[in-house]
Image (cartoon, coloured by chain):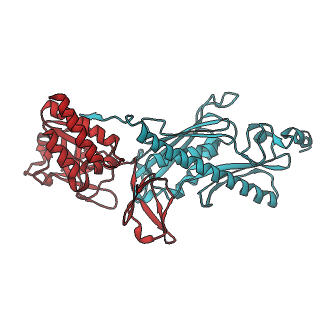
Chain colours: A cyan, B red
Amino acid sequence: MIAMDENDISFFKDGLRLDGRRADELRPVKIKVGVLARADGSCYIEMGGNKVIAAVYGPREVHPRHLQEVTRAIVRYRYNMASFSVEERKRPGPDRRSYELSKVSREALEPVILTSFFPRSVIDVFVEVLQADAGTRTAGINAAAVALADAGIPMKSMISSCAAGKVGDTIVLDPMKEEDNFGQADLPIAMTPNGDITLMQMDGNLSIDEFHQAVEMAMKGAKDIYELQRRALVEKYSQISAASGQEEVHLYE
Amino acid sequence: MDRKVVVPGDLLSEDAKRSGEGTYIKDGSVYSLLYGLANYRDKINVIPLAGKYMPAPGDNVIGVVKDITFSNWIVDINSPYDGLLHISEYPKRIESDEMSKYLRIGSSIMTRVKDVDPTMKVELTLNDRKLGPIKTGQVIEISHTRVPRLIGKGGSMISMLKKEVNCSIFVGQNGRIWINGCRDDTDLALKTIALIEKEAHTNGLTDRIVNFLKAEKEARS
C-alpha cells in the first residue's frame, strides 16, 4: 500500500488511462456468432486483449448417468485457459482458479436457462480462453450467453457481464491487465438487461460509496455489452438470408 | 413484413393474451424465450433458428434402431431422448426372441410418437398403414426447425412437391426425410429440399419453389 503513491501517477496520463481510455470506457469488443460447425451453438469474443471462444452442446443425454436430474436439465460449464493464453506458460488442466470460475459462471447463467424444459438432459458449455488480458470470466460469460442463444436454448433473457475496478483511487470500467495486477480492487458482475445481478465478486478494498459507484459503472458497461451481443445475433441472421448456401444437407444412411 | 429477429428476453407485446409458442409472460407482458423469428399474428410465436427436436405425441418421425431389449426396440429419433418401440406396437404379433428378425440394429423406421411422459419417456408406434420399416429409397436430415416450412400451410408445400417431383416423400418432424423414386426424380427432390431449408425464413417461398421446379424441369428436357 505504501508503494501505491508511485503507481498512482502512472495509471493516468492527461486524464486518460494507459491505453488511452476514459475511466468509464470499455475496451473494444468484437463478437462473432456460430464459429464452430460441430457445436450446437458457438461464439467468439474479443474484449480488448481477451480472446475467448465458447461452445454449447445440448440438451443431450447425460454421461455419467448418476448426474442426471429427473425433472430438469443440468448445466455444466467448463472454463479453461489455454497454456499459451498468458505470458508465462500456464500449466494445462483444471486448477483451483478455473474450478471456481466454472462454478460462478455456471451460476451466473443458470437462472435464465429454462432447465425444466429438458428433464434428464445436460447442457454443456465450454469456454476456452485463447488469450488473457484481465476479465476473462466476464468475456467467457458474455460468449457463453450468446452461444446458448445460438444453440436455440430457451432463456428468460440474455446475460451480459462486465467488471469495474479501482486504480489510483479512481473507479474505472473494464480494467485491463496492468490495472488488474497493480490496482486496488476488481469487481466483476453479470446481469440480465433489466438489471438483475447473477454474479458479483470482488477482491481488494472499496469503501461503500466506491462500491456503489463501481457497481453502477459495471452495470452500465454490461448494458452496452448486451447491445453488442444482440447486434451480433441479429447480424448472423441477416448474413444467412443474404449469402445463403452455408448449410448443407447431410446424407443419412 | 410481420417478422423480426428477436433474442431471449425481448419485449414482444404488453398484451399477455398474445403469448404464443416460444414466449413467456412476466408482469402481464410477453417476452421472447428464444433466439429466432417473431411472428406477429393473433398470437405472437417465436420460431427458433436452431435447437434440438423435442418429441410430442402424434409426431411422425424417422428413427434408427440402436438397441434391442427384452420387449422394446430402442430407437434414435434425432433428439436428446431415445424412443421406445414396444413389441406390441409392431403391426404383427412377434415373439420376443424373434425381434431382431423384423427390426435389426441399424434399421430405419417411419414411426409415430404415441406418448411422451413428464420424464420424457418416449413411446413409439408402428400401428398405421403409413408407418413401417424403410427398405428402399434414401433418408436425409435437415434441421427440424425447417420442417414446418417444408410441409407448408396445411401441407401445401409438401403435396405440391410430391406431385411435381413424382416421388414418395415421408417427412419426419425430427428433420429426417425419406424420399423414394427414380434417380433423377430423387435428385430433383433433394435439390428442392435443400433450397427450402436454405430459404426457410423468407416470404413467398412456395411460389419461388414452383418456379425453381419449372426451370429445373425445362433444363432437363
Q: Residue at x 32, y 56 (%)?
A: B120
**Observer-nearest of B193 and B138:** B193
Q: Position of residue A190 (x, y in %)?
A: 63, 53
Compared to residue A137, the image places residue B31 above or below, namely below
Query: Percent position (x, y) of residue A160?
Result: 60, 51
Residue sitting at 7 percent across and 51 percent down? B92
Residue in the foreground of this view, choosing between A19 and B64: A19
- In-front residue for pair A100/B113: B113
Q: In the rendered picture of this protein, how many numbered marks are placed on residues?
A: 0
Q: Quadrant of the C terminus of chain B?
A: top left
Horizontally, is A188 left or right of A40 in the view? Answer: right
Res B210 seen here: yes
| Residue B166 locus on image (x, y percent) | 13, 39
Q: Is residue B76 visible?
A: no
| Quadrant where the image shows the N terminus of chain B | bottom left
Which residue appears farthest toward the left when viewing the image? B92
Where residue B216 sits in the image (x, y, percent)? 21, 33
Name the foreground residue: B14 vs B178.
B14
Instruction: Using the image, determine if residue B56 lies above or below residue A51.
Output: below
Q: Residue at x 83, y 49 (%)?
A: A170
Horizontally, residue B28 falls left or right of residue A90, namely left
Quadrant in the picture for residue A97? top right
